[in-house]
Amino acid sequence: MLTHLEQFLPNNEPNSLKNFPFFWISQVNGKYTQLIEKSIKKLGIDNTKRKIILATNALGEGSITEIANLATTKLTTATKAVYRLVEDGIVEVFSSETDERISMVKLTAKGLELVDKINQISIVTLSGILNAFDEDELHALNKQLKKLYDIM
């Protein structure tokens, strides 16, 4: 089966996790989430709202399903977050012109201002980390992560 790759799979050996790529992906994601949550707390938003705001910004406008997929959140979680963001005046929800059953979302002026603040905080929080890599290393890392994503 995968005998030549067994060293990269978890097994009963305590240190086997350290060779498992998904262990490191999970660890990096967890650390990243902790850093960002701590940094954005002063904006009065949590990480789920941040992801919804940035996904909406990336799409310009999109259905809640599209936003949930881009933000890598469950649809129910995204829906709740979107309607909390509506209450906060950060996004607005409207019916799709092509299918009124589909709820579309876009950022308000307040939401666009928040995107700028989130991005500034991200730059401050992550620049020191990213400076540990040169440009070629970051391109290579992104290429490998995209390859992994596409395979999955």
Image (cartoon, rainbow, N blue to C red):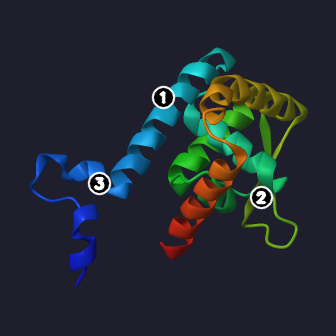
- In primary-sequence order, the first of circles 2 and 3 is 3
Secondary structure beneath dot 1 equals helix
Q: CA distance from mark 3 to mark 1?
A: 23 Å
| Label 3 crowd (10 A; few <14 / some 14-19 / many >=20) | some
Secondary structure beneath dot 2 equals strand
Instruction: Identify which residue is drawn at 64% across, 30% down.
Output: 126
In the image, what residue type sits under mark 2?
Gly
- In primary-sequence order, the first of circles 3 and 1 is 3
Q: Which of the image's four quarters has the N terminus? A: bottom left
Residue labelled with disc 2: 62
Residue labelled with disc 1: 34
* Percent coordinates x, y for residue 57 in the rendering: 80, 46
Task: Say left or right for 83 vs 21.
Answer: right
Q: CA distance from mark 2 to mark 3?
A: 39 Å
Nearest-to-viewer mark from 3 and 1: 3
In the image, what residue type sits under mark 1?
Gln
* Percent coordinates x, y for residue 112 in the rendering: 85, 35
Residue labelled with disc 3: 19
* Among the 4 quarters of the image, the one containing residue 102: bottom right
* Percent coordinates x, y for residue 103 in the rendering: 73, 58
Instruction: Identify which residue is drawn at 39% across, 47% down.
Output: 24
